[in-house]
Image: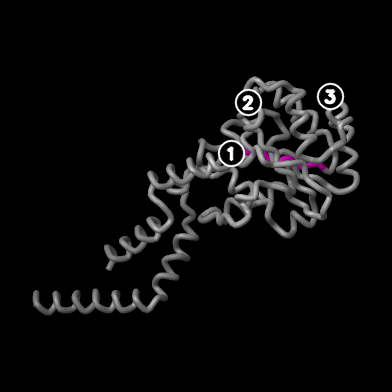
Amino acid sequence: MKEFKSEVSALVRSKFTTPDDLAKKVAADLHREITSSAEITPPQKDGKSFYYPPMYDNKKVIGRDMFINELRKNIKKHNLLTICGIGGVGKTAVAIETCKNDELEGQYDMFFIAMERLGANASEGQFIDLIAEAMGLPDDARKGLDALIAATKGECAKRPVLLLFDNYESIDEEKGKAVITSLTGVRQLKMLVTSRRKVGIANIEKEKKLKPLNSDFDKEENARLVDVIKSLDSYKILEARVRLLADKDELGSG
């Protein structure tokens, strides 16, 4: 029976994906994400509290419940929270799923900032433009870092804001860090970052590492799914047959 249970456990894992399938899936997701990001337009003031690529509207994140719950708790405690991990591990999907939460959407205006639209050679001014565009700030906010900070403070005074910087590693490290550091001084502003590396702001940044699902599988989720399988009639029939065969073997050996 131990061997049978281990096979069921392996079956549960395989229902999610194999490492190769996972790599193919996330690569395809990343491609769709990059191509769709160019279509993101400045938000309209229509009462929505979170703006993100439409491809994530019905995307289901599996096996990350505990990690997402931890992120939601950490957003409340830290002004700068960075999800770090290798490319294609699912950082973007996890970050968006974290923000798609009634409590957070009720508290913050949240804006998705697609950093891959910039690139390593982008200037600080282009980064400022991207933030102002994503937030729907007036043109004056694009006149420099001080102007962006002033406009952001104005928005945060109306309602707390959460900015989701996706694929932060796309921009030059020092230029990105300078802008993010200045934004950490804005009250009522939270920042969630997905990146292959930390932003690097000591004593302010909280890093959460996201590992590949197969090497960091949620044990509680796995156990829950095994219980679900065991509750199925087909499982009970199969288990009964295994026991019957085991009993026959014992009788035969006796």
Q: Examine the rendering and report whether any part of residue 81 can be seen.
A: no
Q: Position of residue 247 (x, y in %)?
A: 18, 78
Q: Position of residue 85 (x, y in %)?
A: 54, 37
For residue 202, the mark is: none
Q: Residues within 10 Å of mark 1 (few under 14, many from 20)?
A: few
Cα distance, mark 1 to mark 2?
Answer: 14 Å
Name the residue rendered at 86%, 32% in the picture.
139
- Of tags 3 and 1, which is closer to the observer? 1
Mark number displayed over residue 35: 1
Label 3 belongs to which residue?
A: 144
Point 47% across, 57% down: residue? 219
Q: Position of residue 6 (x, y in %)?
A: 32, 61
Residue at screen point 82% across, 55% down: 47
Spatial CA span between label 3 and label 1: 28 Å
Q: Quadrant of residue 153?
A: top right
Decide which of 125, 199 is in the foreground and name it. Answer: 125
Task: Provide the residue span drawn in magenta.
Answer: 189-194
**How has the structure been colored for display?**
one colour
Of the image marks 3 and 1, the number of the one nearer the N terminus = 1
Q: Between label 1 and label 2, give the one nearer the viewer.
A: 1
Inspect this view and state whether residue 141 appears. yes
- The secondary structure type at the circle numbered 3 is loop
Main secondary structure type of the part rendered in magenta = strand
Rendered residue at 83%/47% (across/down): 160
- The residue type indicated by label 3 comes to Gly
Q: Nearer the viewer, residue 85 or 76?
A: 85
Marker disc for residue 119: 2
Mark 2 element type: loop
SS category of the residue bearing label 1: helix
- Disc 2 crowd, CA 10 A, few/some/many (<14, 14-19, 20+): some
